[in-house]
Amino acid sequence: MTVLVTGADGFVGRWVVRALVAAGHAVVAAAGPGATPPADLAALGGVRWVSLDLRDPVSVAALAGERCDAVLHLAGLASGAEALRDPALAWDVNAAGTARLLEALGRRRAAGDGDPRVVVVSTAEVYGPCGRALTEADPVRPVSPYAASKAGMELAARETAARTGLRVVTARPFPHTGPGQDDRFVTAAFARRLAAARQLRARVVKVGNLEVTRDLLDVRDVADAYLALLSAGTPGEAYNIASGTGVRLRELFDRLAGVLGVDAIPETDATLVRPHDVPFLVGDASKLRAATGWAPRIPLDRTLREIVDAQAR
């Protein structure tokens, strides 16, 4: 099939494009305005690159006119810190941008010009605080601008689907990492700071709040889950993408220090602490597993080693 991927030039998007091509699919890869295809994907066969600005209705309408069998909507403001600095931008890109795209796809469907299955990518952060593994039946209670903008995205998707008949599936991935992730995200940031400490022969490494617990997945497992939902997700349903296992950030820091061979001492830096951070974010992916057979396959220690190796190149 032909799959339209928004945000194809992002961290997750690059892995998704590779997975789709490996599975034999054709890809229409939408990147941000003025962006060029990532160097590692530029020569990949079966991929056609196009431009997308989610804040521009003309750009969105042009993209919605692309012939495709399925849409994976990854594009958006992905950094919680960036969303906190500019909540209005987060809402404009994540919620309003998704509404623009789905409205354009719904109009195309109403005109009899295609009926793609659409997977919109939200976040597990929409659930807010909870002291146990979360299921899709749990209420949505966002406590950050990023999570709120993603909850708004979900609401826009649900309303548009009900009104237009668009077949929309919602994915709620729990935190994920892997080779190529940038330093705005905690695992890559830890790895970079620990590597710098080793080079400088320093022991103290600045960190944020190490007491939070996260269900941490490899990006390649998450990409596989998205492909599974494109084929087997039920329209109108939401699916957690999670391992069910929590890792405290202090443990993550220590495991990365072990990979790098650094005897490091973490020191809290108030500027790195996220306000209203969810203390425990672990998910139950039984619903996804029952629908698609998906399960994570890459152990965390392998992921951490490959992140360190990638940063050293």
Image (spheres, rainbow, N blue to C red):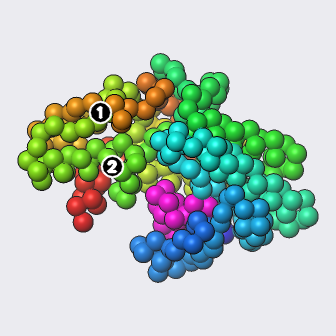
Nearer the observer, 303 or 272: 272
Rendering coords of residue 113 (x, y %): 86, 67
Q: Is residue 166 left or right of residue 290?
A: right
Q: Nearer the viewer, mark 2 or mark 1?
A: 1
Three-letter residue code for mark 1:
Asp
Q: Residue at x 55, y 64 (%)?
A: 8
First in sequence, mark 2 or 1: give its number: 2
Q: Quadrant of residue 215?
A: top left
Q: Is residue 170 left or right of residue 132?
A: right
Give the residue pinned by disc 2.
188
Q: Residue furthest left?
A: 201
- Image: 288 above or below 70: above
User: Helix, strand or loop at disc 2?
Assistant: helix
Whether residue 150 is visible: no
What residue span does the magenta drawing correspond to? 3-23
Q: Residue furthest right?
A: 111
Three-letter residue code for mark 2:
Ala
Please tell me how crowded label 1 is: few (under 14), some (14-19), or many (20+) other residues with Cα within 10 Å: few
CA gap, disc 2 and disc 1: 17 Å
Please tell me how crowded label 2 is: few (under 14), some (14-19), or many (20+) other residues with Cα within 10 Å: many
Q: Quadrant of residue 123?
A: top right
Q: Quadrant of the C terminus?
A: bottom left
Q: Quadrant of residue 211?
A: top left
Whether residue 274 is visible: yes
Nearer the observer, 101 or 110: 101
Rendering coords of residue 157 (x, y %): 74, 45
**Magenta stretch contains residue 257:** no
Give the residue pinned by disc 1.
269
Rendering coords of residue 220 (x, y %): 44, 54
Q: Is residue 273 left or right of residue 60?
A: left
